Image (cartoon, helix red, strand yellow):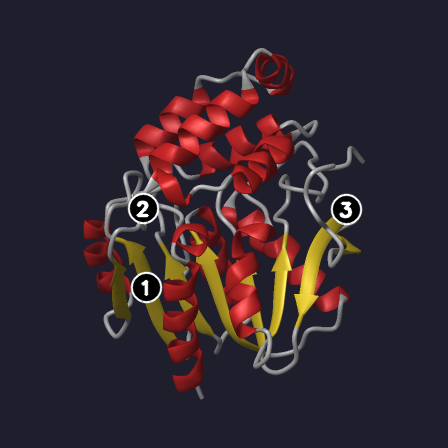
């Protein structure tokens, strides 16, 4: 598999899940919490959140199917398929009952699907997509064509330039964006199969039919200045989870785990502490 030379993966482990090599981190001791990154990211999007919580919780942080150093096969990249892959990973590495599942953006939809497979855990949604999906997003991705055209087209993209511009758009304060973060996203985007997997995941966001899992409690975290999924979307999620606690993160865009990790860790810690 193509290496990611500029990023430290010293704590990354690998396991076979559904017959596919899967990268993940398993950090800390205590009740098990799964952290699921968003579209185009890797588990490293939670690095600073993990550092704040690993003294109290066992944190399992996978690179979702098609991302980072996890394999990128042709096939289904719906939230249900991604959650099934994570569920198999958890079984294979011996993770029993979950204390909570947290997911960012696309990872929030995956978290809901995983919660349906592992009922009774707490659920944290961070800047999630609309409950029914975003048809405009799905339509845009449907124009990309098949795997060959997607992969060939990706070779023509000035990846580092585009990554920098995109992340600066996602952050409320671009000054918080480090060169290390840009390098990490750029290197992940250059891996063979990444472009195909990303387009397939975006297509899946066009229409969502998510289950209604049985959860121990729900926390919704949202960057107040999210330009992709505006914080007003919390209203639709409250219709699905009426008892949810909503925390708006000021001066924060679409990537709270990287832009304001201390605020995310504090809110998540308080939430996890209240769960049975």
| Measured Cα–Cα span from mark 1 to mark 3 | 31 Å
- Residue at the spot x=38%, y=34% of the render? 168
Label 1: how many Cα within 10 Å (few below 14, some 14–19, many 20+): many
Q: Quadrant of the C terminus?
A: bottom left
Mark 2 or mark 1, which is nearer to you? Answer: 2
Q: Relative to 58, say whether 71 is above or below.
A: above
- Is 245 in front, or is 158? 158
Indicate which disc, 1 or 3, sits on the residue closer to the N terminus.
3
Whether residue 232 is visible: yes
Numbered badge on residue 62: none
Mark 1 or mark 3, which is nearer to you? Answer: 1
Q: Secondary structure at mark 2?
A: loop
Q: Where does the image place residue 56, in percent across and percent down from the top left?
A: 57, 81
Q: Is residue 85 left or right of residue 79?
A: right
Residue at the disc numbered 3: 20
Q: Where does the image place residue 265, in percent across and percent down from the top left?
A: 43, 68
């Amino acid at each position: 598999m193509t290496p990611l030379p500029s990023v430290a993966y010293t704590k990354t482990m690998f396991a076979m899940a559904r017959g596919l090599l899967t990268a993940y981190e398993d950090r800390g001791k205590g009740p098990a919490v799964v952290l699921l990154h968003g579209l185009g990211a890797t588990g490293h999007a939670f690095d600073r959140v993990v550092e704040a919580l690993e003294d109290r919780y066992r944190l399992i942080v996978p690179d979702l199917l098609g991302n980072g150093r996890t394999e990128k096969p042709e096939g289904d990249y719906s939230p249900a398929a991604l959650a099934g892959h994570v569920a198999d990973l958890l079984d294979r590495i011996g993770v029993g009952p979950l204390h909570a599942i947290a997911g960012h953006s696309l990872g929030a939809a995956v978290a809901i699907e995983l919660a349906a497979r592992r009922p009774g855990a707490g659920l944290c949604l961070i800047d999630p997509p609309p409950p029914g999906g975003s048809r405009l997003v799905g339509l845009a991705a449907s124009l990309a064509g098949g795997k060959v055209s997607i992969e060939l087209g990706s070779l023509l993209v000035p990846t580092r330039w585009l990554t920098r511009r995109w992340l600066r758009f996602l952050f409320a304060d671009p000054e918080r964006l480090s060169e290390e973060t840009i390098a990490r996203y750029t290197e992940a985007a250059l891996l063979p199969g990444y472009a195909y997997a990303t387009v397939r995941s975006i297509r899946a966001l066009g229409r969502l039919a998510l289950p209604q899992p049985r959860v121990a409690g729900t926390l919704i975290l949202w960057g107040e200045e999210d330009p992709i999924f505006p914080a007003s979307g919390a209203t639709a999620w409250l219709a699905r989870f009426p008892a949810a606690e909503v925390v708006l993160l000021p001066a924060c865009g679409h990537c709270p785990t990287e832009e304001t990790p201390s605020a995310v860790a504090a809110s998540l810690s308080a939430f996890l502490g209240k769960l049975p």
